[in-house]
Image (cartoon, helix red, strand yellow):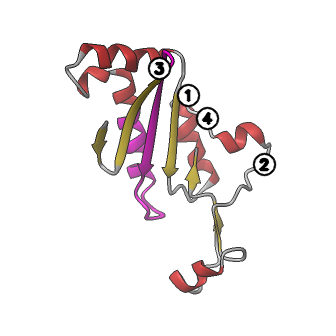
Amino acid sequence: MYNTNKTVICLFEQDGINLIVINVHFPHKETDTIGREERLNLIDGLLNDPSSLTNDSSVVTRFEDAVNKNNILIMGDFNMHFPGENLVIDKHNFYDLWLQKHSHFDGLTSDSTRNILRNYMQPLDNRRMRLDRM
């Protein structure tokens, strides 16, 4: 397991199949689009150079196997406030599972009209957004 900058990377193996699961919590400020892109750049770099994570050659080999087979799941608080930010995901050849399944951007994960607790946490904020991704 690797943990940095609110990003946790875990490598699992079951029946000879290697899987990388990455949980993220990107910068939450609406205006910090560069910070979110930098985090994706960091993840992409780690996926392309697993030896920067560990000196254990067996772990590096399993990690590379998972990457080569696209056995990677990235999920969490991407905190992307704008549909255009998905271009950063596409740039790294990652895929937004919601958009793979549905042809529309809806899939809201922050919606004060459906979740009244948001009204208590952030009164007067009526935005409806997709902050979370897989």
The residue most toward the right is 103
Task: In the rendered view, tell whether residue 28 sits above or below residue 7.
Answer: below
Task: In the rendered view, tell whether residue 3 sits above or below residue 30.
Answer: above
The residue most toward the front is 15
Distance, label 1 to label 3, CA atoms, is: 15 Å
Task: In the rendered view, tell whether residue 119 sits above or below residue 108.
Answer: below
Identify the mark nearer the N-term, 4 or 3. Answer: 3
Distance, label 1 to label 2, CA atoms, is: 19 Å
Name the residue type under label 4: Tyr
Identify the mark nearer the N-term, 3 or 2. Answer: 3
Distance, label 1 to label 4, CA atoms, is: 7 Å
The residue positioned 22% from the left and 19% from the top of the image is 56
Checking the image for residue 23, the label placed there is: none
Q: Which residue is mark 1?
A: 93
Within 10 Å of the Cα at label 2, are there few (<14), some (14-19), or many (20+) other Cα atoms?
Answer: few
Q: Which residue is mark 4?
A: 95
Magenta residues span 14-43
Contact between marks 1 and 4 (CB within 8 A): the answer is: yes
Contact between marks 3 and 2 (CB within 8 A): the answer is: no
Picture coordinates of residue 125, whole percent (x, y): 59, 80
Contact between marks 4 and 3 (CB within 8 A): the answer is: no
Q: Which residue is mark 3?
A: 66
In this rendering, the label closer to the viewer, 3 or 2: 3
Task: Determine if the magenta segment contains residue 20.
Answer: yes
Q: In the picture provided, is 101 more to the left or to the right than 38?
A: right
Q: Which residue is mark 2?
A: 104
Picture coordinates of residue 52, whole percent (x, y): 24, 25
In this rendering, the label closer to the viewer, 4 or 3: 3
Picture coordinates of residue 1, whole percent (x, y): 31, 36
